[in-house]
Amino acid sequence: MTDEQLMRAAIREAGKAEALGETPIGCVIAREGKIIARGYNRRMTDKQTLAHAELFAIRKACKKAGDWRLEDCTLYVTLEPCPMCAGAIVQARIPRVVYGASNPKAGCAGSVLNLLNEPRFNHQAAVEAGLLGETCADLMRDFFRTLREKKRVAQTESANEAGKTEQED
């Protein structure tokens, strides 16, 4: 599979997260162009800080590989990794990371920090940013736009209910 096909697979994983009402972030890990692990965001569903797409995929890839080192793999993720996920990538010795959309508030593959290329660490990862970036960014923008709209509707309905109660009194 090509990088683009693998990123599209990560986008499909993001769709699984979105179907649960989660922030649409998806990840796949490939070895020699074949997917060995998948993951998607489940923080709200699992009520777990650690339930990030990358961590699910890394855990599954390690199990499949029978090793904690993933030195011959590439990680594809729809959103630039956060500090926790970037640290896990370094710890797993993943040599290459491809991501779609930048994360200007928490990205640690170059946006806020670059933990994946920190020379003081034992291992670094080559980073390729922006593959299908607009598609990945649109997933995030659309999700949060819809979330804001639902919140506005709920607030309006709540205000209308409060108004009805006052009129009845």
Image: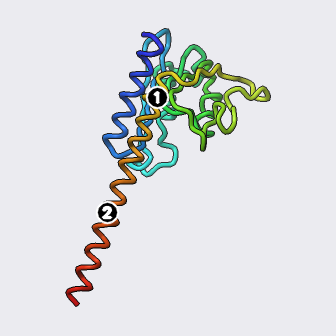
Q: Secondary structure at mark 2?
A: helix
Q: Is residue 137 above or below residue 8?
A: below
Give the spatial CA distance, label 1 vs label 2.
Answer: 30 Å
Q: Residues within 10 Å of mark 2 (few under 14, many from 20)?
A: few
Quarter placement of the C terminus: bottom left
Q: Secondary structure at mark 1?
A: helix
Please report the residue visible at 31 percent of the width from the left and 40 percent of the height from the top. Answer: 19
Instruction: Name the kind of residue labelled 1 in the image.
Output: Glu
| Residue ID for mark 1 | 134
Quarter placement of the N terminus: top left
Instruction: Name the kind of residue labelled 2 in the image.
Output: Ala
Q: Is residue 141 above or below residue 136?
A: below
Q: Which mark is residue 168?
A: none
Q: Residue furthest right?
A: 120
| Picture quadrant of residue 142 | top left
**Measured from the top left, where is residue 71 in percent x and y?**
60, 17
Q: Nearer the viewer, residue 8 or 27?
A: 8
